[in-house]
Image (tube, helix red, strand yellow):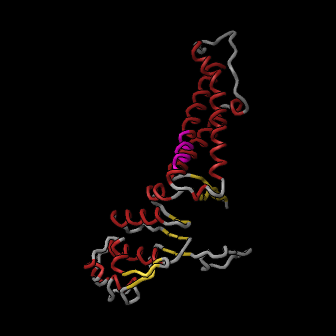
Protein backbone atom coordinates (compact mmCIF):
# COMPACT_ATOMS: atom_id res chain seq x y z
CA UNK A 1 0.00 0.00 0.00
CA UNK A 2 2.81 2.41 0.84
CA UNK A 3 4.90 1.26 -2.11
CA UNK A 4 7.79 0.26 0.15
CA UNK A 5 7.60 -3.44 -0.73
CA UNK A 6 7.12 -5.22 -4.05
CA UNK A 7 4.48 -7.99 -4.01
CA UNK A 8 5.95 -11.47 -4.38
CA UNK A 9 2.87 -12.47 -6.34
CA UNK A 10 0.02 -10.59 -7.97
CA UNK A 11 -0.36 -6.84 -8.11
CA UNK A 12 -1.30 -4.05 -5.73
CA UNK A 13 -3.65 -1.46 -7.22
CA UNK A 14 -4.50 1.73 -5.36
CA UNK A 15 -7.77 3.57 -5.83
CA UNK A 16 -7.96 6.73 -7.90
CA UNK A 17 -7.43 9.85 -5.84
CA UNK A 18 -5.98 7.99 -2.86
CA UNK A 19 -3.72 10.22 -0.77
CA UNK A 20 -1.79 8.42 1.96
CA UNK A 21 -0.06 9.88 5.01
CA UNK A 22 2.18 7.55 7.02
CA UNK A 23 3.25 7.75 10.67
CA UNK A 24 5.70 5.03 11.71
CA UNK A 25 6.87 3.97 15.14
CA UNK A 26 10.38 5.25 14.44
CA UNK A 27 9.00 8.74 13.69
CA UNK A 28 10.17 11.23 11.11
CA UNK A 29 13.20 13.33 11.91
CA UNK A 30 12.85 16.94 12.96
CA UNK A 31 15.49 19.60 12.45
CA UNK A 32 16.71 20.30 16.01
CA UNK A 33 18.21 23.69 15.15
CA UNK A 34 14.87 24.95 13.82
CA UNK A 35 11.98 26.08 15.97
CA UNK A 36 8.75 24.10 16.12
CA UNK A 37 7.19 26.76 13.89
CA UNK A 38 9.96 26.51 11.29
CA UNK A 39 9.75 22.72 11.26
CA UNK A 40 6.12 22.66 10.21
CA UNK A 41 6.42 25.68 7.89
CA UNK A 42 9.65 24.58 6.15
CA UNK A 43 11.59 27.49 7.60
CA UNK A 44 8.81 30.06 7.26
CA UNK A 45 5.86 30.96 9.43
CA UNK A 46 2.83 29.99 7.31
CA UNK A 47 1.46 26.60 6.36
CA UNK A 48 -1.16 25.17 4.00
CA UNK A 49 -3.55 22.89 5.87
CA UNK A 50 -6.05 21.09 3.63
CA UNK A 51 -6.16 23.98 1.18
CA UNK A 52 -6.24 26.70 3.84
CA UNK A 53 -3.22 28.95 4.26
CA UNK A 54 -2.79 29.88 7.91
CA UNK A 55 -0.18 31.12 10.35
CA UNK A 56 1.83 28.28 11.82
CA UNK A 57 1.40 29.46 15.41
CA UNK A 58 -2.38 29.31 15.11
CA UNK A 59 -2.14 25.80 13.73
CA UNK A 60 0.28 24.65 16.44
CA UNK A 61 -2.09 25.87 19.14
CA UNK A 62 -4.39 23.01 18.12
CA UNK A 63 -1.60 20.74 19.33
CA UNK A 64 -1.20 22.53 22.67
CA UNK A 65 1.74 24.77 21.69
CA UNK A 66 1.74 28.24 23.19
CA UNK A 67 3.26 30.98 20.98
CA UNK A 68 6.43 30.89 23.10
CA UNK A 69 6.83 27.12 22.76
CA UNK A 70 6.10 27.33 19.03
CA UNK A 71 9.12 29.65 18.71
CA UNK A 72 11.34 27.31 20.77
CA UNK A 73 14.01 25.26 19.03
CA UNK A 74 13.23 21.57 18.75
CA UNK A 75 16.41 20.64 20.61
CA UNK A 76 14.90 22.32 23.69
CA UNK A 77 11.46 20.71 23.45
CA UNK A 78 10.33 17.86 25.66
CA UNK A 79 9.66 14.41 24.25
CA UNK A 80 5.93 14.97 24.44
CA UNK A 81 6.22 18.29 22.59
CA UNK A 82 8.29 16.70 19.84
CA UNK A 83 5.68 14.00 19.39
CA UNK A 84 2.92 16.61 19.19
CA UNK A 85 4.97 18.48 16.60
CA UNK A 86 5.27 15.31 14.51
CA UNK A 87 1.50 14.86 14.74
CA UNK A 88 1.01 18.46 13.63
CA UNK A 89 3.14 17.81 10.55
CA UNK A 90 1.26 14.61 9.80
CA UNK A 91 -2.22 16.11 9.98
CA UNK A 92 -1.22 19.11 7.89
CA UNK A 93 -0.84 16.78 4.90
CA UNK A 94 -3.66 16.47 2.37
CA UNK A 95 -4.56 12.82 2.96
CA UNK A 96 -7.69 10.70 2.89
CA UNK A 97 -5.97 7.60 4.27
CA UNK A 98 -3.81 7.62 7.41
CA UNK A 99 -1.54 4.65 8.06
CA UNK A 100 -0.28 4.62 11.65
CA UNK A 101 2.30 2.14 12.93
CA UNK A 102 2.27 1.98 16.75
CA UNK A 103 1.32 5.66 17.04
CA UNK A 104 1.03 5.62 20.85
CA UNK A 105 4.63 4.54 21.49
CA UNK A 106 6.36 6.97 23.86
CA UNK A 107 3.38 9.35 24.00
CA UNK A 108 2.54 11.07 27.26
CA UNK A 109 -1.10 11.23 28.34
CA UNK A 110 -1.56 14.79 27.08
CA UNK A 111 -0.23 13.93 23.61
CA UNK A 112 -2.28 10.73 23.48
CA UNK A 113 -5.45 12.72 24.13
CA UNK A 114 -4.52 15.11 21.31
CA UNK A 115 -3.91 12.18 18.96
CA UNK A 116 -7.24 10.55 19.75
CA UNK A 117 -9.12 13.81 19.21
CA UNK A 118 -7.55 14.62 15.84
CA UNK A 119 -8.19 11.05 14.68
CA UNK A 120 -11.85 11.29 15.70
CA UNK A 121 -12.08 14.56 13.74
CA UNK A 122 -10.38 13.04 10.66
CA UNK A 123 -12.79 12.61 7.73
CA UNK A 124 -10.88 9.88 5.90
CA UNK A 125 -9.99 6.27 6.57
CA UNK A 126 -7.63 5.21 9.34
CA UNK A 127 -5.47 2.07 9.21
CA UNK A 128 -3.63 1.54 12.49
CA UNK A 129 -1.37 -1.13 13.96
CA UNK A 130 -1.28 -0.84 17.75
CA UNK A 131 -0.81 -2.88 20.91
CA UNK A 132 -2.71 -0.23 22.90
CA UNK A 133 -6.14 -1.76 23.51
CA UNK A 134 -7.65 1.34 25.10
CA UNK A 135 -6.51 3.46 22.16
CA UNK A 136 -8.09 1.01 19.69
CA UNK A 137 -11.35 1.01 21.64
CA UNK A 138 -11.44 4.81 21.49
CA UNK A 139 -10.74 5.36 17.77
CA UNK A 140 -11.55 2.32 15.58
CA UNK A 141 -14.83 0.92 14.28
CA UNK A 142 -13.56 -2.44 13.01
CA UNK A 143 -10.59 -4.78 13.41
CA UNK A 144 -8.56 -7.01 11.11
CA UNK A 145 -7.70 -9.98 13.31
CA UNK A 146 -4.78 -12.16 12.21
CA UNK A 147 -5.76 -15.66 13.32
CA UNK A 148 -2.72 -17.53 12.02
CA UNK A 149 -2.12 -19.77 8.99
CA UNK A 150 -2.79 -16.88 6.63
CA UNK A 151 -6.31 -16.21 7.92
CA UNK A 152 -7.42 -12.62 8.46
CA UNK A 153 -10.87 -11.94 9.91
CA UNK A 154 -12.75 -8.65 9.92
CA UNK A 155 -14.59 -7.89 13.14
CA UNK A 156 -16.94 -4.90 13.29
CA UNK A 157 -16.56 -3.16 16.64
CA UNK A 158 -13.86 -2.42 19.18
CA UNK A 159 -11.18 -4.60 20.72
CA UNK A 160 -13.46 -5.26 23.69
CA UNK A 161 -16.17 -6.39 21.26
CA UNK A 162 -13.69 -8.82 19.70
CA UNK A 163 -12.77 -10.25 23.11
CA UNK A 164 -16.45 -10.85 23.84
CA UNK A 165 -16.95 -12.57 20.48
CA UNK A 166 -13.85 -14.71 20.97
CA UNK A 167 -14.87 -15.75 24.48
CA UNK A 168 -18.37 -16.62 23.32
CA UNK A 169 -17.06 -18.73 20.42
CA UNK A 170 -14.65 -20.52 22.74
CA UNK A 171 -17.46 -21.28 25.17
CA UNK A 172 -19.64 -22.58 22.36
CA UNK A 173 -16.87 -24.87 21.10
CA UNK A 174 -16.30 -26.24 24.58
CA UNK A 175 -20.03 -26.81 25.04
CA UNK A 176 -20.26 -28.53 21.66
CA UNK A 177 -17.37 -30.81 22.56
CA UNK A 178 -18.91 -31.73 25.89
CA UNK A 179 -22.49 -32.13 24.58
CA UNK A 180 -22.45 -32.96 20.83
CA UNK A 181 -26.24 -33.40 20.73
CA UNK A 182 -26.85 -29.92 22.08
CA UNK A 183 -25.31 -28.38 18.97
CA UNK A 184 -27.88 -29.83 16.58
CA UNK A 185 -31.19 -28.81 18.09
CA UNK A 186 -32.92 -27.46 21.16
CA UNK A 187 -34.93 -30.15 22.92
CA UNK A 188 -37.59 -29.94 25.59
CA UNK A 189 -37.23 -32.51 28.39
CA UNK A 190 -39.76 -35.34 28.67
CA UNK A 191 -42.18 -35.00 31.54
CA UNK A 192 -42.29 -38.73 32.30
CA UNK A 193 -39.89 -40.56 34.60
CA UNK A 194 -38.05 -37.52 35.99
CA UNK A 195 -34.55 -38.24 37.34
CA UNK A 196 -33.48 -37.29 40.84
CA UNK A 197 -32.20 -33.92 39.59
CA UNK A 198 -35.29 -33.20 37.48
CA UNK A 199 -36.32 -29.64 36.74
CA UNK A 200 -38.95 -27.82 38.67
CA UNK A 201 -42.12 -26.76 36.90
CA UNK A 202 -40.80 -23.19 36.63
CA UNK A 203 -37.49 -24.40 35.18
CA UNK A 204 -39.29 -26.58 32.61
CA UNK A 205 -41.23 -23.52 31.47
CA UNK A 206 -37.97 -21.58 31.27
CA UNK A 207 -36.30 -24.33 29.22
CA UNK A 208 -39.24 -24.46 26.83
CA UNK A 209 -39.08 -20.69 26.26
CA UNK A 210 -35.30 -20.40 25.84
CA UNK A 211 -35.04 -21.59 22.18
CA UNK A 212 -37.51 -18.93 21.07
CA UNK A 213 -35.63 -16.21 22.97
CA UNK A 214 -32.31 -17.35 21.50
CA UNK A 215 -33.75 -17.46 17.98
CA UNK A 216 -35.14 -13.92 18.34
CA UNK A 217 -31.77 -12.56 19.46
CA UNK A 218 -29.95 -14.39 16.67
CA UNK A 219 -32.37 -12.87 14.14
CA UNK A 220 -31.70 -9.39 15.52
CA UNK A 221 -27.97 -10.13 15.52
CA UNK A 222 -28.12 -11.08 11.83
CA UNK A 223 -30.04 -7.90 11.01
CA UNK A 224 -27.49 -5.71 12.78
CA UNK A 225 -24.63 -7.55 11.06
CA UNK A 226 -26.24 -6.82 7.69
CA UNK A 227 -26.49 -3.13 8.59
CA UNK A 228 -22.83 -3.02 9.64
CA UNK A 229 -21.77 -4.78 6.44
CA UNK A 230 -23.41 -2.09 4.29
CA UNK A 231 -20.89 0.13 2.41
CA UNK A 232 -22.16 3.31 4.04
CA UNK A 233 -21.93 2.12 7.63
CA UNK A 234 -18.44 3.54 8.17
CA UNK A 235 -19.59 6.93 6.90
CA UNK A 236 -22.10 7.24 9.74
CA UNK A 237 -21.40 9.60 12.60
CA UNK A 238 -20.48 8.18 15.99
CA UNK A 239 -23.93 9.11 17.26
CA UNK A 240 -25.45 6.90 14.56
CA UNK A 241 -23.03 3.96 14.63
CA UNK A 242 -22.34 3.60 18.35
CA UNK A 243 -25.89 2.50 19.30
CA UNK A 244 -25.66 -0.27 16.70
CA UNK A 245 -22.26 -1.40 17.97
CA UNK A 246 -23.45 -1.22 21.57
CA UNK A 247 -26.58 -3.26 20.82
CA UNK A 248 -24.47 -5.86 19.01
CA UNK A 249 -22.28 -6.24 22.09
CA UNK A 250 -25.39 -6.53 24.29
CA UNK A 251 -26.80 -9.29 22.09
CA UNK A 252 -23.49 -11.17 22.11
CA UNK A 253 -23.43 -11.11 25.91
CA UNK A 254 -27.12 -12.05 26.21
CA UNK A 255 -26.79 -14.96 23.80
CA UNK A 256 -23.81 -16.30 25.71
CA UNK A 257 -25.82 -16.26 28.95
CA UNK A 258 -28.95 -17.78 27.41
CA UNK A 259 -27.08 -20.56 25.63
CA UNK A 260 -25.19 -21.40 28.82
CA UNK A 261 -28.45 -21.43 30.78
CA UNK A 262 -30.13 -23.63 28.17
CA UNK A 263 -27.19 -26.05 28.22
CA UNK A 264 -27.37 -26.30 32.02
CA UNK A 265 -31.12 -26.93 32.11
CA UNK A 266 -30.98 -29.36 29.19
CA UNK A 267 -28.25 -31.40 30.87
CA UNK A 268 -30.28 -31.65 34.07
CA UNK A 269 -33.44 -32.53 32.18
CA UNK A 270 -31.70 -35.38 30.38
CA UNK A 271 -30.21 -36.63 33.61
Where 153 falls versus 88 (above or below)? above
User: From where the camera sits, is residue 222 visible?
Assistant: yes
Question: Residue 228: image x %, image y %?
Answer: 62, 51
Task: Determine the residue positioned at 66% across, 54% down.
Answer: 230
Q: Position of residue 203 (x, y in %)?
A: 58, 17
Please give left or right for residue 73 compared with residue 114 in the image.
left
Of residue 255 and residue 200, the one placed in the foreground of this image is 255
Residue 151 left/right relative to 51: right
Question: Which residue reaches farthest left?
Answer: 68
Q: Check the picture and name the quadrant holding the C terminus.
A: top right
Looking at the image, is 150 positioned above or below residue 34?
A: above
For the point 57% across and 39% down, the residue is 251
Which residue appears at 29% of the width and 84% of the height?
73
247 sits to left or right of 68: right
Image height of 155 relative to 62, above or below: above
- Asked if residue 267 shows in the view, the reply is no
**Residue 63's x, y, as percent?**
36, 71
SS majority, magenta = helix
Residue 168 x %, y %: 58, 41
Say which quarter of the image contains residue 58: bottom left
* Foreground of the two, 73 or 259: 73
188, 249: nearer the viewer? 249
Q: Which residues are magenta?
A: 242-250
**Image quarter of the N terminus:** bottom right
**Is 243 in the magenta?**
yes
Q: Residue at position x 55%, y 67% from top? A: 124
**In the image, farthest residue toward the top:** 193
Amino acid sequence: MLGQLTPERGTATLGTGLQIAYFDQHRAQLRPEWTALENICDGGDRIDVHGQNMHGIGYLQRFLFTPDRARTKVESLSGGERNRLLLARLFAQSANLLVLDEPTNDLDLETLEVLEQVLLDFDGTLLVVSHDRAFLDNVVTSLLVFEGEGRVREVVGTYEDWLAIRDRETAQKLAATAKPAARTEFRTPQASKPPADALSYKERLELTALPEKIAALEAEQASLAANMAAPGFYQLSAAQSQPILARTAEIDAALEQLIERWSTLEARALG
